[in-house]
Image (cartoon, rainbow, N blue to C red):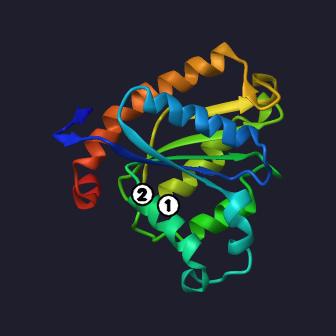
Amino acid sequence: MSTFYGMTAPYRIVAVSGSLHEPSKTTALLRAIAAAVAERAEVEVQMIELTAVGPALAGALRRDHLPASVEAQLVAIEQADLLIVGSPVYRASFTGLFKHLFDFVGQYALVGKPVLLAATGGGERHALIIEHQLRPLFAFFQALTLPLGVYASDTDFDGYVINSEILQARISLAAERALPLVGYAASRTAEALVG
Protein backbone atom coordinates (compact mmCIF):
# COMPACT_ATOMS: atom_id res chain seq x y z
CA MET A 1 0.00 0.00 0.00
CA SER A 2 1.43 3.35 -1.05
CA THR A 3 0.95 6.65 0.70
CA PHE A 4 1.51 10.10 -0.73
CA TYR A 5 0.53 13.25 1.16
CA GLY A 6 -1.59 11.28 3.61
CA MET A 7 -3.66 9.43 1.02
CA THR A 8 -3.53 5.67 0.80
CA ALA A 9 -3.83 3.72 -2.42
CA PRO A 10 -5.32 2.05 -4.39
CA TYR A 11 -5.36 4.84 -6.91
CA ARG A 12 -8.04 4.78 -9.59
CA ILE A 13 -6.34 4.84 -12.97
CA VAL A 14 -8.42 5.23 -16.10
CA ALA A 15 -6.70 4.72 -19.44
CA VAL A 16 -8.50 6.00 -22.54
CA SER A 17 -7.43 4.66 -25.92
CA GLY A 18 -8.45 6.75 -28.91
CA SER A 19 -7.65 3.94 -31.33
CA LEU A 20 -10.37 2.83 -33.71
CA HIS A 21 -8.84 -0.63 -34.19
CA GLU A 22 -8.45 -3.81 -32.20
CA PRO A 23 -5.75 -4.97 -31.73
CA SER A 24 -4.10 -1.59 -31.35
CA LYS A 25 -0.59 -0.29 -30.74
CA THR A 26 -2.08 2.67 -28.87
CA THR A 27 -4.00 0.39 -26.53
CA ALA A 28 -0.88 -1.76 -26.05
CA LEU A 29 1.10 1.38 -25.14
CA LEU A 30 -1.51 2.52 -22.62
CA ARG A 31 -1.63 -0.95 -21.04
CA ALA A 32 2.17 -0.89 -20.69
CA ILE A 33 2.07 2.55 -19.03
CA ALA A 34 -0.68 1.45 -16.63
CA ALA A 35 1.29 -1.71 -15.81
CA ALA A 36 4.38 0.39 -15.06
CA VAL A 37 2.38 2.53 -12.63
CA ALA A 38 0.91 -0.63 -11.08
CA GLU A 39 4.45 -1.93 -10.44
CA ARG A 40 5.06 1.11 -8.23
CA ALA A 41 1.78 1.56 -6.34
CA GLU A 42 -1.44 -0.19 -5.55
CA VAL A 43 -3.90 0.75 -8.27
CA GLU A 44 -7.18 -0.19 -9.86
CA VAL A 45 -6.98 0.15 -13.64
CA GLN A 46 -9.92 0.63 -15.97
CA MET A 47 -9.33 0.67 -19.71
CA ILE A 48 -11.74 2.57 -21.95
CA GLU A 49 -11.39 1.71 -25.63
CA LEU A 50 -13.16 3.63 -28.37
CA THR A 51 -13.55 0.39 -30.28
CA ALA A 52 -16.02 -0.58 -27.54
CA VAL A 53 -17.72 2.73 -26.68
CA GLY A 54 -17.40 4.53 -30.02
CA PRO A 55 -20.54 3.16 -31.68
CA ALA A 56 -22.68 4.37 -28.76
CA LEU A 57 -21.00 7.79 -28.85
CA ALA A 58 -21.22 8.50 -32.53
CA GLY A 59 -24.83 9.69 -32.79
CA ALA A 60 -25.09 11.50 -29.46
CA LEU A 61 -25.19 15.28 -29.35
CA ARG A 62 -25.72 15.73 -25.61
CA ARG A 63 -24.57 13.81 -22.56
CA ASP A 64 -28.12 12.97 -21.53
CA HIS A 65 -28.55 11.21 -24.90
CA LEU A 66 -25.81 8.70 -24.09
CA PRO A 67 -26.57 5.15 -22.97
CA ALA A 68 -25.90 4.27 -19.32
CA SER A 69 -22.81 2.26 -20.26
CA VAL A 70 -21.10 5.33 -21.76
CA GLU A 71 -22.23 7.55 -18.89
CA ALA A 72 -20.50 5.12 -16.52
CA GLN A 73 -17.28 5.50 -18.54
CA LEU A 74 -17.52 9.30 -18.34
CA VAL A 75 -18.01 9.14 -14.57
CA ALA A 76 -14.94 6.89 -14.32
CA ILE A 77 -12.90 9.46 -16.27
CA GLU A 78 -14.11 12.27 -14.04
CA GLN A 79 -13.42 10.36 -10.82
CA ALA A 80 -10.00 8.94 -11.74
CA ASP A 81 -6.93 9.76 -9.66
CA LEU A 82 -4.82 9.49 -12.83
CA LEU A 83 -5.84 9.57 -16.47
CA ILE A 84 -3.62 7.93 -19.05
CA VAL A 85 -4.83 9.08 -22.45
CA GLY A 86 -3.57 8.23 -25.90
CA SER A 87 -4.49 8.32 -29.54
CA PRO A 88 -2.93 7.26 -32.77
CA VAL A 89 -2.02 10.16 -35.02
CA TYR A 90 -4.87 10.50 -37.47
CA ARG A 91 -4.90 13.31 -40.03
CA ALA A 92 -2.28 15.18 -37.93
CA SER A 93 -4.34 14.99 -34.73
CA PHE A 94 -6.11 12.62 -32.37
CA THR A 95 -9.10 10.67 -33.63
CA GLY A 96 -12.42 12.44 -33.89
CA LEU A 97 -14.18 9.98 -31.58
CA PHE A 98 -11.49 10.56 -28.92
CA LYS A 99 -12.33 14.27 -29.00
CA HIS A 100 -16.06 13.51 -29.09
CA LEU A 101 -15.75 11.42 -25.92
CA PHE A 102 -14.02 14.28 -24.10
CA ASP A 103 -16.64 16.72 -25.41
CA PHE A 104 -19.01 15.04 -22.94
CA VAL A 105 -16.69 15.31 -19.92
CA GLY A 106 -17.74 18.04 -17.50
CA GLN A 107 -15.86 21.29 -18.14
CA TYR A 108 -14.54 21.46 -14.56
CA ALA A 109 -14.45 17.72 -13.82
CA LEU A 110 -10.74 17.38 -14.60
CA VAL A 111 -9.44 20.48 -12.81
CA GLY A 112 -6.10 19.59 -11.23
CA LYS A 113 -6.34 15.95 -12.32
CA PRO A 114 -3.02 14.40 -13.38
CA VAL A 115 -3.09 13.30 -17.01
CA LEU A 116 -0.30 11.29 -18.62
CA LEU A 117 -0.31 11.89 -22.37
CA ALA A 118 0.62 9.26 -24.94
CA ALA A 119 0.40 8.79 -28.68
CA THR A 120 1.43 6.43 -31.46
CA GLY A 121 2.27 7.13 -35.06
CA GLY A 122 3.94 5.81 -38.17
CA GLY A 123 7.22 7.58 -37.46
CA GLU A 124 9.01 10.09 -35.26
CA ARG A 125 7.73 13.03 -37.31
CA HIS A 126 4.36 12.69 -35.53
CA ALA A 127 5.73 12.92 -31.98
CA LEU A 128 4.67 16.55 -31.53
CA ILE A 129 1.01 15.49 -31.39
CA ILE A 130 1.49 15.34 -27.64
CA GLU A 131 2.49 19.01 -27.42
CA HIS A 132 0.36 20.48 -30.21
CA GLN A 133 -2.87 18.51 -29.89
CA LEU A 134 -3.23 16.57 -26.62
CA ARG A 135 -1.70 19.06 -24.18
CA PRO A 136 -3.94 21.99 -25.30
CA LEU A 137 -7.06 19.82 -25.04
CA PHE A 138 -6.36 18.98 -21.41
CA ALA A 139 -5.19 22.52 -20.66
CA PHE A 140 -8.75 23.58 -21.53
CA PHE A 141 -9.95 21.29 -18.71
CA GLN A 142 -7.32 22.82 -16.36
CA ALA A 143 -5.96 19.32 -15.88
CA LEU A 144 -2.44 18.73 -14.61
CA THR A 145 -0.78 17.31 -17.72
CA LEU A 146 2.41 15.56 -16.73
CA PRO A 147 5.52 17.05 -18.32
CA LEU A 148 6.78 13.75 -19.71
CA GLY A 149 4.59 12.29 -22.44
CA VAL A 150 5.14 8.93 -24.12
CA TYR A 151 5.24 8.65 -27.90
CA ALA A 152 5.77 5.40 -29.77
CA SER A 153 6.31 4.85 -33.47
CA ASP A 154 5.65 1.70 -35.48
CA THR A 155 9.29 0.65 -35.17
CA ASP A 156 8.90 0.40 -31.37
CA PHE A 157 6.60 -2.61 -31.81
CA ASP A 158 6.83 -6.17 -32.99
CA GLY A 159 3.24 -6.59 -34.08
CA TYR A 160 1.38 -5.22 -31.07
CA VAL A 161 4.12 -5.94 -28.51
CA ILE A 162 6.58 -3.25 -27.44
CA ASN A 163 10.08 -4.32 -28.43
CA SER A 164 12.03 -1.10 -27.82
CA GLU A 165 14.19 -0.78 -24.71
CA ILE A 166 14.24 3.00 -25.14
CA LEU A 167 10.44 3.12 -25.13
CA GLN A 168 10.29 0.80 -22.10
CA ALA A 169 12.68 3.11 -20.26
CA ARG A 170 10.55 6.16 -21.11
CA ILE A 171 7.41 4.37 -19.91
CA SER A 172 9.16 3.52 -16.62
CA LEU A 173 10.35 7.10 -16.18
CA ALA A 174 6.89 8.51 -16.90
CA ALA A 175 5.31 6.16 -14.34
CA GLU A 176 7.95 7.04 -11.75
CA ARG A 177 7.44 10.77 -12.22
CA ALA A 178 3.65 10.51 -12.27
CA LEU A 179 3.09 8.95 -8.86
CA PRO A 180 4.15 11.85 -6.59
CA LEU A 181 1.88 14.18 -8.56
CA VAL A 182 -0.99 11.70 -8.39
CA GLY A 183 -0.62 11.49 -4.62
CA TYR A 184 -0.41 15.26 -4.28
CA ALA A 185 -3.43 15.94 -6.50
CA ALA A 186 -5.52 13.23 -4.84
CA SER A 187 -4.94 14.84 -1.45
CA ARG A 188 -6.03 18.33 -2.58
CA THR A 189 -9.35 19.84 -3.55
CA ALA A 190 -9.74 21.14 -7.09
CA GLU A 191 -10.08 24.67 -5.71
CA ALA A 192 -6.73 24.38 -3.95
CA LEU A 193 -5.02 23.20 -7.12
CA VAL A 194 -6.15 26.13 -9.24
CA GLY A 195 -6.75 28.82 -6.62
Find out whether the residues at labels 2 and 1 contact each other: C-beta distance under 8 Å.
yes
Left or right, 147 with reference to 30: left
The reply, left or right, for residue 36 in relation to residue 3 is right
Q: Is residue 128 visible?
A: no
Q: Please identify the quadrant where the N terminus is shown.
A: top left
User: Element type at marker 2?
Assistant: loop
Q: Is residue 178 above or below residue 46?
A: above
Report the residue marked by disc 2.
142
Q: Residue at x 33, y 38 (%)?
A: 181
| Badge 2 amino acid | Gln
Amino acid bearing label 1 = Phe
Measured Cα–Cα span from mark 2 to mark 1: 5 Å
Residue 56 location (% of width, % of height):
69, 74
Give percent across and percent down for residue 34: 52, 37
Disc 1 secondary structure class: helix
- Residue topped by disc 1: 140
What's the residue at 76%, 30% (across, down)? 153
Q: Quadrant of residue 6?
A: top left
Which dot marks residue 21? none
| Looking at the image, residue 168 lies above or below residue 174 | above
Q: Is any atom of residue 47 visible in this view?
A: yes
Q: Residues within 10 Å of mark 2 (few under 14, many from 20)?
A: many
> Residue 66's x, y, as percent?
60, 80
At a point 78% along the width and 43% down the height, the residue shown is 23
